[in-house]
């Protein structure tokens, strides 16, 4: 059978080997990466092969299926995300100016930060809600499929060296206070105030395989969907739609969109540039 135009035999073999590795991981560990975007997978698996000293994908597959520690290292590689407090400050400025007024209409606010990674985004959201007088009547659910990063997020501790850039982001995002009031320095560590985390609930949740677990007034899932293939993106969009109350708000990353999906007509833009959308009845 002829290969599609532009697809070489070597590329097709590589895709088959990746499929076999991911199928093996799913069957052995119950972790499903089969819907992830191929380009992202290839880069991360190539890096894992170099660091594990495995010359082929088949050798990497054999190693992770027989060595739980190697599987844990692969899991970390596949879940690495670029994150920072108040990353994309214009998003948080738009959230403060356009979403917070909508949240004020609810007596109690539930927000889901899906794909929370190590918690920088979750704390950024909590700071905005605190400054707007809404944190006391809010519950933030922060989830990630990687239990290790969820444990790190729960500590609310980050390297002190990052605080300079985080302060700059915070001010650009419309912060109204001294950023340093939110954390205390303990040697090389910045430890954030328990007041910010007391209304947070951290849990392991896999967007690939797990379902809805509550109704939310807002869902933030930024810079996660770009790593998923189109079928998986559609599944996650359906999950988010089913998890939002009517007129609930969905926030995505700058390179993500609800446009060109089957659910596009079920949302209206709050700020299309910042990828903030509201579910409509």
Image: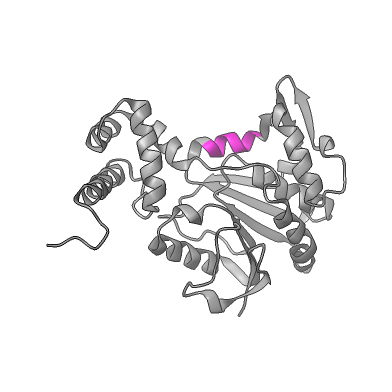
- Which image quadrant: the C terminus? bottom right
| Residue 47 percent coordinates (x, y) | 39, 34
Relative to residue 189, is residue 24 drawn left or right? Answer: left
In the visual, does 38 lie left or right of 142?
left
Q: Main secondary structure of the magenta part?
A: helix
Q: Is residue 65 visible?
A: yes
Residue at image position (51%, 74%) is 263
Is 277 located above or below residue 19 in the figure?
Answer: below
Quarter-of-image position of residue 184: top right
In this view, the residue in front, 62 or 213, is 62
Q: Which quadrant, please, contains the N terminus? A: bottom left
Was residue 193 drawn as part of the magenta stretch in this picture?
A: no
Q: Which contiguous range is marked in magenta?
A: 149-155
- In this view, the residue in front, 189 or 49, is 49
Outermost residue toward the left in this view = 1
Q: Left or right: 244 with respect to 186?
A: left
Is residue 71 among what the camera can see? no
- In front of the other: 265 or 141: 265
């Amino acid at each position: 059978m002829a290969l599609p135009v532009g697809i070489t035999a070597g590329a097709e073999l590589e895709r088959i080997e990746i499929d076999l590795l991911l199928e093996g991981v799913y069957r052995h560990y119950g972790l499903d990466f089969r819907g992830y975007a191929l380009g992202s997978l290839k880069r991360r698996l190539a890096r894992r092969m170099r660091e594990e000293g495995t010359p082929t994908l088949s050798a990497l597959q054999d190693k992770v299926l027989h060595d739980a520690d190697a599987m844990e290292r692969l899991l970390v590689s596949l879940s690495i995300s670029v994150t920072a407090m108040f990353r994309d400050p214009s998003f948080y400025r738009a959230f403060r100016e356009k979403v917070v007024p909508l949240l004020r209409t609810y007596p109690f606010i539930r927000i889901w930060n899906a794909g929370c990674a190590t918690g920088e985004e979750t704390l950024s959201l909590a700071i905005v809600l605190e400054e707007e007088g809404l944190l006391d009547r809010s519950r933030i659910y922060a989830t990630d499929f990687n239990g290790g990063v969820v444990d790190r997020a729960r500590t609310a501790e980050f390297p002190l060296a990052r605080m300079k850039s985080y302060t700059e982001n915070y001010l650009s995002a419309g912060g109204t206070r001294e950023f340093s009031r939110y954390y205390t320095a303990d040697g090389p560590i910045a430890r954030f105030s328990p007041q910010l985390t007391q209304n947070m609930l951290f849990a392991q949740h896999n967007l690939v395989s797990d379902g809805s677990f509550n109704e939310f007034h807002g869902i933030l899932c930024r810079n996660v969907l770009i790593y998923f293939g189109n079928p998986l993106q559609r599944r996650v969009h359906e999950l988010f739609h089913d998890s939002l109350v009517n007129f609930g708000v969905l926030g995505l990353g700058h390179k993500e969109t609800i446009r060109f999906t089957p659910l596009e007509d079920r949302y209206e833009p709050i700020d299309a540039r910042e990828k903030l959308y509201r579910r409509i009845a």
